Image (cartoon, rainbow, N blue to C red):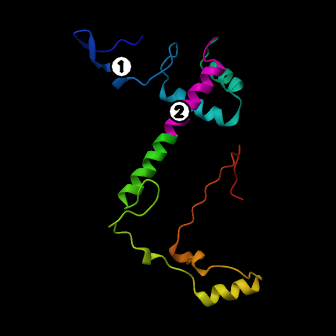
Amino acid sequence: MTNAHKVDLWGETIYDGRDQFFEKTCSRETFKSNRFMELLLDFSTDMSNRKAAGRLNRIRLESKGISPTTFRNTVEREGQKMQKHIEGKCEEILLHNGFTVGGERCEGSEYDVSGMFHIDKEAAEEAASELNIKKFDISDYEDPEATVNISLDDVCVKRQTDE
């Protein structure tokens, strides 16, 4: 159990420093250094939990060390923290720029829809006829000079190249 400052008032805890100064861990789990967490997360991308836990234990010269189950639980907890932080940042950006958390435009926001630039209609129709595309909506094609392309990939690859 972690020793920390604790204030009890008539049998009720009104302040406990453990919650504010230390991250939550499982019952028999120890605190991990930043360097250890960096290695843990790095190894989790390249190898199985058993191999990664074994490698960490060899590096730290520990015979018992971290178990594969604790390794997995720690990686999952860190991943959930990262995901929660990313989602919070996205919500903050949306709200700051006049949108709801769901991505809908708020009433009275300063966002200007007329700021979207579409490519020349004649050029799009000519390209569509060259490619033998019969049905298309010109509003789906924005001017490449005034756009930002964002690509999200659900496929988890072990190694990614620039090609």
Q: Is residue 157 above or below residue 48?
A: below
Secondary structure of the residue carrying tag 2 is helix
Q: Residue furthest front?
A: 107
Q: Is residue 65 left or right of residue 47?
A: left
In the image, what residue type sits under mark 2? Glu
| Disc nearer the start of the sequence (1/2) | 1
Please state which of residues 143 and 34 is positioned toward the viewer in this rendering. 143
> Residue 59 location in percent, x, y?
62, 22
Residue 18, disc: 1
Q: Which residues are magenta?
A: 64-82
Residue most toward the right?
132
Residue located beneath label 2 in the image: 78
Q: Residues within 10 Å of mark 1 (few under 14, many from 20)?
A: some
- Which quadrant of the rendered structure holds the C terminus? bottom right
- Marker disc for residue 100: none
Q: What is the x, y in percent for residue 99? A: 40, 60
